[in-house]
Structures are given as structure tokens and as C-alpha cells.
Amino acid sequence: MAWTEHDYEKIPGTYVFNGRRSLMGYSLNKMCMSFNSGDNRDEFSRDEAAYCNKFGLSDEQRDAVLKRDILKLLQLGGNIYYLAKLAGITHLSVQDVGAQMSGVTVEEFKAKLLAAAED
């Protein structure tokens, strides 16, 4: 299937969850949805790589999961709402994810939030 390039794809740092990314990330998002079950969260915690393989993640997706690289997972088809489940069970805070997406440290990100609150 040929995909039409959209103007938003030319904006650096923009990863729109469109049809193409949906297909790329289907297995990843399905795995993240499985975390609704406590048993699945426990299984993931016991052997994260095996759990990723169980869902057929690509090597690049599995590596990003193991590295907690949420930004890379967005690029690889992850939907932020599903990735929030992964972030939650791996103890990443909203500030951790925001810092990754902003390309700064968590401390720098928190400082930006505080500075914005003072404006």
C-alpha cells in the first residue's frame, strides 16, 4: 500500500499516529493494552524481552521497550495512550516522558514547568 506524505511529516519531532504508524505499531500497542491485566503485568516484569517476543515486536521496538525509550516507540508506531500503560508499569513519571520528548533531562524539564507556571 502506498502512503501519501502529509505536510505534518515534514515538521521535525512530529509523530502523528496515522494509518501508517498504526500498522507499524499494531503489535506494540496490543502488548501495551495487555497490561490491563495484572497477570500480564507480572509476566512482563518477570521477563520483559520474552514478553515482547510473545507479541511479535520488531527488534527495534523490543530494544526501545527495554531501554524505556518512549520517543523511539512513538516513532515506531506506538500510541501515546497505550504507551502510558508501559510507562506506568515501568515507573516512568509524566515528567520522565516529557523530558524524553523534549530532549532534556528530567531536572531541566521540571525547571521549564516551574518557569512556565511563574509566567
Image (tube, rainbow, N blue to C red):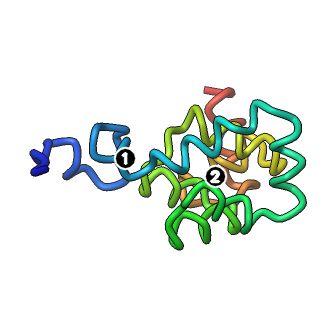
Q: Nearer the viewer, residue 3 or 53?
A: 53
Instruction: Name the residue rendered at 73%, 54% in the picture.
Output: 106
* Most distant residue in the front direction: 54
Left or right, residue 16 beside residue 79: left
Q: Quadrant of residue 85?
A: top right
The percent position of residue 33, horizontal first and vertical second, equals 64, 35
- Up the image or down, 7 lies above or below 107; here it is above
For mark 1, what is the residue? 15
Q: Which residue is mark 2?
A: 99
Q: Is residue 53 left or right of residue 9?
A: right
Q: Earlier in the sequence, mark 2 or mark 1?
A: 1
> For this view, does 67 lie left or right of residue 8?
right
Residue type at numbered disc 2: Ala
**Residue shown at the point (34%, 40%) measured from the top left:** 16
Residue 28 percent coordinates (x, y): 55, 50
Looking at the image, do the residues carrying marks 2 and 1 touch, with CB atoms under 8 Å apart? no
39 or 74: nearer the viewer: 39
Structural distance between the alpha carbons of marks 2 and 1: 16 Å
Label 2: few (<14), some (14–19) or many (≥20) C-alpha neighbours in 10 Å: some
Q: Nearer the viewer, residue 71 or 89?
A: 89
Q: How many marks?
A: 2
Determine the secondary structure under disc 2. helix
Give coordinates of residue 26: x percent, y percent: 46, 45
Q: Quadrant of the C terminus?
A: top right
